[in-house]
Every structure is written in structure tokens, then in C-alpha cells.
Image: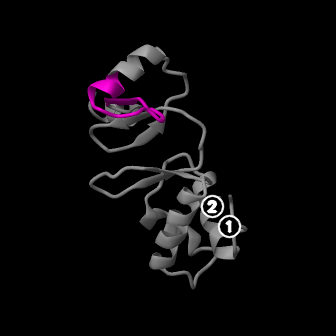
């Protein structure tokens, strides 16, 4: 059950939902401080954990630069730039047959709850810089 959010919680949720760059906790903290200047980094981490637990946002990670957060909680896939680390939503459905997903889960001894496809390569900005 989703709990009612206080002003700090609303500010953190707004930052995550209005960006498509999948921000880190540090990036969220810096953005939230524009509207809630007295908020602390530990508070942002606590709020992010609560928002994930309550199903308002998704946590994507962990990565070497920390977890990233996604305001789009519907099932979707991501692409990761192997040069700059950009994390992008894949705007088309990547369809994998259910029997393939179940076989992959069984092979690892898991019971499948959900899945996500990750594509790895160079984003358009990195392609331009390297051409």
C-alpha cells in the first residue's frame, strides 16, 4: 500500500518522474535542493528506498557509480552506453517468448518474477564524438 508522501517525498518523486536520464541519488539530491534547500543526502537516500518499496519508482543498479532511479515503473527495457554510461529507455518492446524466459530462469534455479533486457553499445553522442 502506498503511503502519503510528505513535502520532501513529493519533491524527490517529482525529480525522478520528470527526468528521463535515470538519475543517481546524488543527482536527485542536487536537484531537490533547488526546491528543498535544507534536505540532507541521507534523507534523500531514505526517501528513495521508501519510494522503491512502495512501488512509486524503480531502482536500476547497482552500478559502479551507484544505483539509478526510474520514474517509469511499467515494464520496459534499457540500453547502456559502454563509453559514457548513459542509461536510456528502449522505446520499442523487446519481445522474448515466455518459454525462453522460463527456460533461462529454470537454468539458473530461479522462479521468474519479471525480466528486463539490457542492450550495450555506443549512444548517439558517443558515436558522433568517435567518428
SS under mark 2: helix
Q: In the displayed image of the protein, which residue is found farthest to the right? A: 4
Residue 3, percent from left and from top: 69, 65
Residue 123, percent from left and from top: 38, 33
- At 33% from the left and 52% from the top, the residue drawn is 62
The foreground one among 14 and 75 is 75
Question: Would you call the spot at circle 1 few (<14 residues within 10 Å), some (14-19), or many (20 or more)?
Answer: some
SS under mark 1: helix
In the picture, the disc for residue 13 is: 2
Q: Is residue 96 visible?
A: no
Q: Is residue 20 visible?
A: yes
Q: On the image, numbered disc 1 is attached to which residue?
A: 10
- At 68% from the left and 60% from the top, the residue drawn is 2
Magenta range: 104-121
Marks 2 and 1 close (CB-CB < 8 Å): yes
- At 47% from the left and 32% from the top, the residue drawn is 77
Residue 100 image-quadrant placement: top left
Vertical placement of 72 versus 122: above or below? below
Amino acid at each position: 500500500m502506498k503511503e502519503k508522501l510528505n513535502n520532501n517525498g513529493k519533491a524527490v518523486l517529482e525529480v525522478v518522474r520528470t527526468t528521463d536520464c535515470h538519475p543517481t541519488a546524488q543527482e536527485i539530491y542536487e536537484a531537490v535542493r533547488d526546491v528543498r534547500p535544507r534536505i540532507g543526502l541521507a534523507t534523500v537516500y531514505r526517501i528513495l528506498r521508501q519510494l522503491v518499496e512502495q512501488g512509486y519508482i524503480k531502482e536500476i543498479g547497482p552500478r559502479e557509480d551507484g544505483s539509478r532511479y526510474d520514474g517509469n515503473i511499467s515494464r520496459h527495457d534499457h540500453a547502456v552506453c559502454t563509453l559514457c554510461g548513459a542509461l536510456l529507455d528502449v522505446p520499442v518492446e523487446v519481445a522474448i517468448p515466455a518459454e525462453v524466459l522460463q527456460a533461462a530462469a529454470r537454468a539458473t534455479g530461479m522462479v521468474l518474477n519479471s525480466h528486463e533486457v539490457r542492450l550495450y553499445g555506443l549512444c548517439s553522442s558517443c558515436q558522433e564524438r568517435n567518428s
